[in-house]
Amino acid sequence: MSFWEFTVDASYFIAAVLFIVGLKRMGSPRTAKSGIKWAGIGMVLATVVTLWHPAMEAGFFRYVLMLLAIGIGGAGAWYTGKKVEMTAMPQMVALYNGMGGGAAAAIALVEMYSGSAFHHGATVLTLAVVGALIGGVSFSGSLIAWAKLEGKMKKTIRLPGQQMINGGVALLTVILGIWIIASSGSAPVLVTIFFLLSLAFGVLLTNPIGGADMPVVISMYNAFTGLAVAFEGFVLGNAAMIIAGTVVGAAGTLLTLLMANGMNRSISNVLFAGFGVDDGAEAEGPEGEMKSVEAFDAAASFAYSDSLIIVPGYGLAVAQAQHKLWEFVQMLQKEHDVDVKFAIHPVAGRMPGHMNVLLAEAGVPYDLIFDLEEINAEFPNADAALVIGANDVVNPAARTDESSPIYGMPILDVDKARECYVVKRGKGTGFSGVQNALFFGDNTRMVFGDAKQVCTDLANGLKQI
């Protein structure tokens, strides 16, 4: 083994360790920021070593193109990452997932168009084809997820015989993939049709999925992208791609399963049931009347409570109310000695960890934030619960109504608190299209209005007490 080969292998090993350490630290809000930095250092190391790998022999002009691409992509990512609003974070994650899958698919296409993949045997060619398929599906599917979350696709379209169409396209794509593997030449026409079908399948698979399931879809496509990168790592013989892709694929798969379990749904149910396809539509629900109060009355109730549990939802992010909420909470803690905690459901918001990031941005200490398993037993002993912009994750119909689409889904038991206050802009059903029985509960009071303004009014109300 030459010195260069040893240096490359050692660098890839160090990069792999940094990836794993970074991912491990991302598992906790306290260490997530440092975890991202560690993984980023590993990625920079792997990129630099790959660029200067003696086997590349890319030539000066190709190096210029690669560095130019890295510069443009890096500058664009830096700018958008700095400017993105918290409400648009899920869209950005979906978009970046898609770019990763598209890049992996592009690598496979180049290898097949040039014929390189055909010269390395059936195993490498099979991995190239599978990587192109998964990467193409992730790319187009992630773009549809982005469009849905961004509001570019406001209506979910389900074609007659949707699953038959999906199955037919998937079968045809697989047949073409097998044909490519069995062919003796590069078959550029077949490769092109194969890739276009993979893109079409990603669109057809994602389009019928309702907005309520987008967090799971984003996580699933993250796993797809990781797997595609790992497969193309085998095609290129790049250990860093294999390791990074495998780690991302495994983590994304585990997260997808955990989120599906958090909704008491299977992955197949998420992909094919079409739950929440009428996003935001009015739906049948419990009969009764919502009882509303002013923010001042809610503030008075909280001020005289010993304990308060707050449940943030996507509506909090939309209103950018996290800073005003934390200001209000600090007043409760310091001036009225109220024990305040935050409860986070596994699928709160529109992407994994959305609410954790939202609260961290406002400076909420990590020891005040609890997940469902940690906090649920405390609701029956809580004097009050405050729900801001959440819907399905606090709907008691999930426990009691067998006809409800969300029946069996683990929820935050806010209805068991002595008093429950819900901040909501209107009387609609929210993102999933399922009416919430909590809003009609005897111990529930609705505080209608923009979340940021309501939080401001709550703080002003405390000043008058």
Image (spheres, grey):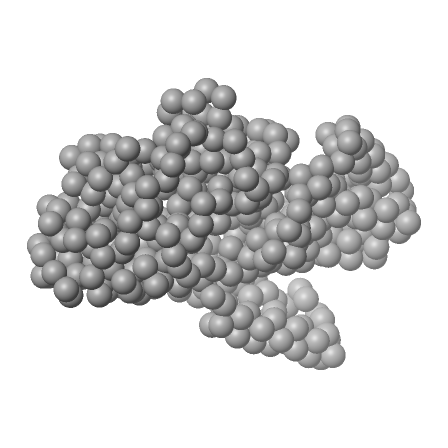
Please give the count of numbered marks on the rendered protein. Answer: 0
Residue pushed farthest top?
402
Where 437 sits versus 293, above or below? above
Quadrant location of the C terminus in the rendered image: bottom left
- Please name the residue shown 49% across and 21% down the image: 403
- Of residue 135 and residue 273, the one placed in the foreground of this image is 273
Quadrant location of the N terminus in the rendered image: bottom right
Residue 104: percent from left, percent from top:
67, 54
Whether residue 185 appears in this view of the structure is yes
- Please name the residue shown 68% across and 55% down the image: 102
- Of residue 462 and residue 412, the one placed in the foreground of this image is 462
Residue 448: percent from left, percent from top:
37, 52
Where 75 sits versus 124, above or below? below
Position of 123 with respect to 451 (left or right) is right
Name which quarter of the figure residue 63 lies in.
Answer: bottom right
Residue 157: percent from left, percent from top:
71, 41
- Of residue 154 and residue 181, the one placed in the foreground of this image is 154
Whether residue 311 appears in this view of the structure is no
Residue 196: percent from left, percent from top:
81, 48
- Please name the residue shown 78% across and 57% down the image: 110
Position of 259 with respect to 186 (left or right) is left
Position of 342 with respect to 382 (left or right) is right
- Please name the residue shown 48% across and 49% down the image: 350
Where 374 sits versus 110, above or below? above
